[in-house]
Image: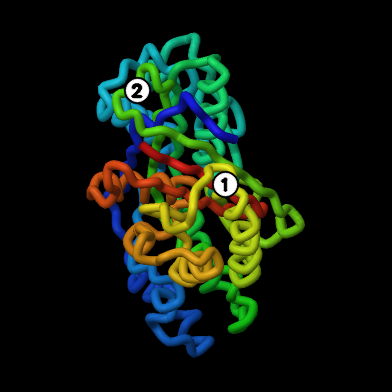
Amino acid sequence: MNYQNVCIEAVTHILPPEVVTTEEIEKWLQPVYDRLHLSPGRLEWMTGIRQRRLWKRGTLPGTQSIQTVRKILEKAAFPAEKIGCLIHGSVCRDYLEPATACGVHHGAGLPPECQIFDVSNACLGLLTGALQIANMIELGQIEAGIVVGTEDSRSLLETTIEQMNQDTTLTRQSIKPFFASLTIGSSSAAILLTHRKISQTQWRLAGGNYLANTAFCHLCRSDETVQTGDSMKTDSEQLLLQGVATAKALFPIFLSERGWQRDEIGRFFCHQVGKAHQKRLYDELELDTTRDFSTLEYTGNTGSCALPTALSIGLEQGICQPHDKIALLGIGSGINSVMLGLER
């Protein structure tokens, strides 16, 4: 998918105020650590994550997404009445129905002609939503759209800790599927896309590619609730291997369709999972790790908001040069991979 008329007008994020350190989590897990003779510090050593953040208890994802939509409109000085599509793309949503996008649309004061719906694609929800909006802009159906999402990890984190402490049958082997849930953090992020004729940034979305590898859809599963889940089991080792393999298969296609070379890309932003994942991804894709921008150390894995949050923080810190080609490398359970290319 190549685009001629789609621009990224703004990217923004909001981080929750409450910080929970990995050291605190291990103190809460002291009963199971003592029983299995696990040494403190192993969780940060395995993941590289020092802390993650939590929303105030009882916060609905849609309520926070309203604030994020307002922030991105203000940041871009873009009129709400020109938004032709709103997509809510996070794993977490308010209810099974209606779409969380409905409440966000109302709360943000968007026009009645604006199309609204939710997109669910695990950690790729916001990138998938961005592609849907880009397609609509390229087809001339709308001139601008926003994809937004809010991930809330509190329930999953607290329930996982409780389950680990109470289940006295856990062994050093059977405890492994729980650890990924301890890396999850909370964030809210949004991307505003516009037609180039009304763009003030002229920061073009050159195109995107996706690849499905659904033979491994069983490697990471949450329960049936609409929040992050009261429980989630993850085969982290296989998910890393198969996820990176999927990205490795897609990356040459992504480069070829953009007409890009590896060494032309100034910055890479990948899904923020853990240090082992990032190292293996860049090793397999033969990319310079110094061009990566990481936030997982202080945000944890914030699901669909992880990559957009890292992009937003990186742009705020001015790490991208004016004419950099930028690659967004997304991998999500399922397994799916989505890659987007940005250039000025």
- Residue 241 in percent (x, y) is at 62, 68
The quadrant of the picture occupied by the N terminus is top right
Identity of the amino acid at label 1? Val
SS of the residue at dot 1?
strand
Q: Residue at x 36, y 53 (%)?
A: 266
Residue occupied by mark 2: 199
Q: Does residue 92 appear in the picture of this structure?
A: no
Q: Which mark is residue 338?
A: 1
- Residue 206 in percent (x, y) is at 48, 36
Task: Assess whether mark 2 and mark 1 are in contact (beta carbons under 8 angstroms).
Answer: no
Crowd band around label 2 with a 10 angstrom C-alpha radius: few (<14), some (14–19), many (20+): many
Q: Nearer the viewer, residue 257 or 43?
A: 257
Residue 244, located in which quarter of the rendered image? bottom right
Residue mark closest to the camera, 1 vs 2: 2
Q: Residue at x 29, y 45 (%)?
A: 315
Identity of the amino acid at label 2? Ser
- Residue 299 in percent (x, y) is at 36, 57
User: Upstream in the sequence, badge 1 or badge 2?
Assistant: 2
Task: State left or right for residue 297 relative to residue 180.
Answer: left
Q: Residue at x 37, y 12 (%)?
A: 81
Q: Residue at x 27, y 47 (%)?
A: 321
Q: CA distance from mark 1 to mark 2?
A: 24 Å
